[in-house]
Image (cartoon, rainbow, N blue to C red):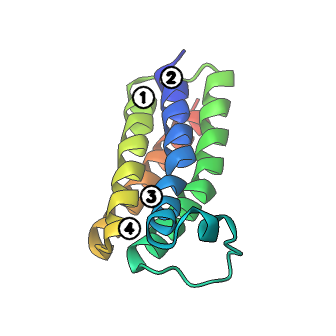
């Protein structure tokens, strides 16, 4: 498996697990039964949990283009130092984005988002320049 595909698996796995903290906060604070009755329109008890949910949604939105460009790079046999570095950076920057978004540190969250976007642009550039 290429580094780019491996990073796609890790990014998808990270995104699959991002719901756990905000759901656990509801279970711990309100109990399992109340959490199972959650309708989704109630306000989160903690601001950090609401931010974690928004960070999760943002990760899902950005996973789609990342997956598409990584798969296109794979199908066209484009893999080089730039694409592997960009895919690896994308994973770490998305993890950092989630942490800082949840913590409410907007400046670092924004820098991580921009970095992850640039990592995707780097892979796109490698695809289009071949």
Which comes before the other along the chain, label 2 or label 4?
2
User: Relative to the observer, which residue lies in front, 127 or 41?
Assistant: 41
Q: Residue at x 63, y 40 (%)?
A: 67
Q: Which residue is mark 4?
A: 101
Separation (CA) of disc 2 from disc 1: 7 Å
Q: Residue at x 35, y 44 (%)?
A: 92
Which comes before the other along the chain, label 4 or label 1?
1
Separation (CA) of disc 4 from disc 1: 25 Å
Q: Quadrant of residue 128?
A: top right
Q: Which residue is mark 1?
A: 84
Sort mark 3 into few (<14), some (14-19) or many (20+) by Cα contacts within 10 Å. Answer: some
User: Relative to the observer, which residue lies in front, 17 or 108?
Assistant: 17
Instruction: Choose mark 2 or mark 4, whichever is in front.
Output: 4
Separation (CA) of disc 3 from disc 4: 13 Å
> Mark 3–mark 4 contact, CB under 8 Å?
no
Which comes before the other along the chain, label 2 or label 1?
2
Q: Which residue is mark 3?
A: 21
Which comes before the other along the chain, label 3 or label 1?
3
Sort mark 2 into few (<14), some (14-19) or many (20+) by Cα contacts within 10 Å. Answer: some
Q: Which residue is mark 2?
A: 79
Q: Residue at x 55, y 63 (%)?
A: 58
User: Relative to the observer, which residue lies in front, 99 or 31?
Assistant: 31
> Mark 2–mark 1 contact, CB under 8 Å?
yes
Q: Position of residue 103 (x, y in %)?
A: 31, 69
């Amino acid at each position: 498996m290429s580094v780019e595909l491996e990073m796609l698996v890790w990014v998808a796995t990270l995104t699959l697990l991002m719901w756990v903290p905000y759901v656990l906060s509801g279970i711990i604070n309100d109990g399992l039964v109340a959490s199972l009755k959650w309708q989704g329109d109630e306000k989160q008890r903690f601001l950090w949990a609401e931010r974690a949910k928004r960070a999760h949604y943002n990760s899902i939105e950005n996973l789609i283009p990342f997956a598409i460009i990584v798969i296109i790079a794979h199908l066209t046999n484009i893999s080089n130092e730039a694409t592997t570095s960009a895919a690896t950076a994308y994973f770490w920057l998305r993890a950092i984005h989630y942490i800082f978004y949840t913590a409410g540190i907007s400046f670092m969250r924004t820098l991580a988002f921009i970095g992850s976007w640039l990592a995707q642009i780097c892979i796109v550039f490698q695809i289009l320049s071949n």
